[in-house]
Amino acid sequence: MSYDIETVRGTWTIDKDHSVIGFSATHAMVTKVRGTFDDFAGTVTVNGADDADVNVTIQTASIDTRQEGRDQHLRSADFFDADNFPEMTFRSTGIRIKDDEEFVLTGDLTIKDVTKSVDVQVEVGGVQTDAYGNLRAGFEGGVTISRKDWGLTWNVGLEAGGFLVSDKIKITLDVSLIKDA
């Protein structure tokens, strides 16, 4: 997929109504629990072909795994401590273009005031003018992190061995951006 850099140069805003920030973790060593963060905002400023500034803020209290008891536990001090750390953020620090359809976005992920660098693998969905005249771009991406690196260490040992919650968490992104006027 190719596009003209002058067409995409500028600032883009995440269209929350057409985007999902999700995650999955292994539960009881046998199955995946999936969830989303329902309240987030962000911008992407494209400066050049391999130069973009990405800033995303996620409200930790907006976590939704479709099970209120689990969601309350994830909001508690055992995990996100949403009362004291209401936001987690991602700020890009670099981009490495693989080809016209894939790139690696490097940035600082901050959770509970702990900041670590991550590499997000991203696929370009396309750039298109929508039915309302908005220039829109779509991306899918993901990264796997160790939750312990951000101080999310609560767990329970299982009788047969192993733990209730996996250390590895897969974060997934399906993002639609609209170019600012």
Image (cartoon, helix red, strand yellow):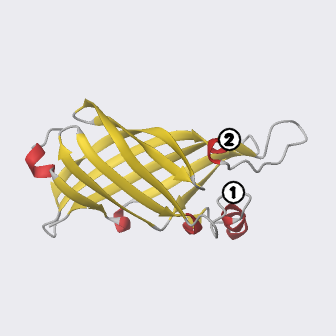
Check if mark 2's residue and mark 1's residue have beta carbons within 8 Å.
Answer: no
Residue 67 placement: quadrant: bottom right
| Secondary structure beneath label 2 | strand
Question: Residue lying farthest right?
Answer: 159
Few, some or many residues within 10 Å of mark 2 (<14, 14–19, 20+): some
Give the left or right position of residue 82, taking residue 29 as reference. left
Q: Nearer the viewer, residue 62 or 93?
A: 93
Q: Position of residue 53 (x, y in %)?
A: 29, 49
Identity of the residue drawn at 63% across and 45% down? 147
The residue at 49%/66% (across/down) is 38
Residue visible at 12% across and 44% down in the picture: 5
User: Residue 168 in the image: x percent, y percent?
Assistant: 63, 40
In the picture of the structure, the residue carrying the numbered disc 1 is 79
Labels 2 and 1: the sequence-earlier one? 1
**89 is higher (above) or lower (below) than 94:** below
Which residue is identified by label 2? 167
Q: Is 36 on the left or on the right of 45, as rendered?
A: right
Circle 1: element type: loop
- Whether residue 31 is situated above or below residue 64 in the rendered picture: above
Which corner quadrant of the image does residue 82 belong to? bottom right
Left or right: 121 in relation to 116: left
26 or 110, nearer to the observer: 110
The answer for how far apart the CA atoms under marks 2 and 1 are is 12 Å
Q: Amino acid at mark 2?
A: Asp
Residue 63 location, quadrant = bottom right
Indicate the position of residue 23 as horizontal and vertical percent values.
Answer: 55, 51
- Look at 68% across and 70% down and name the residue there: 68
Amino acid on which the number 1 mark rests in the picture? Phe
Q: Observer-nearest residue: 123 or 108?
A: 108
The location of residue 40, given as percent across then percent down, is 44, 65
| Mark 1 surroundings: few (<14), some (14-19) or many (≥20) residues within 10 A | some
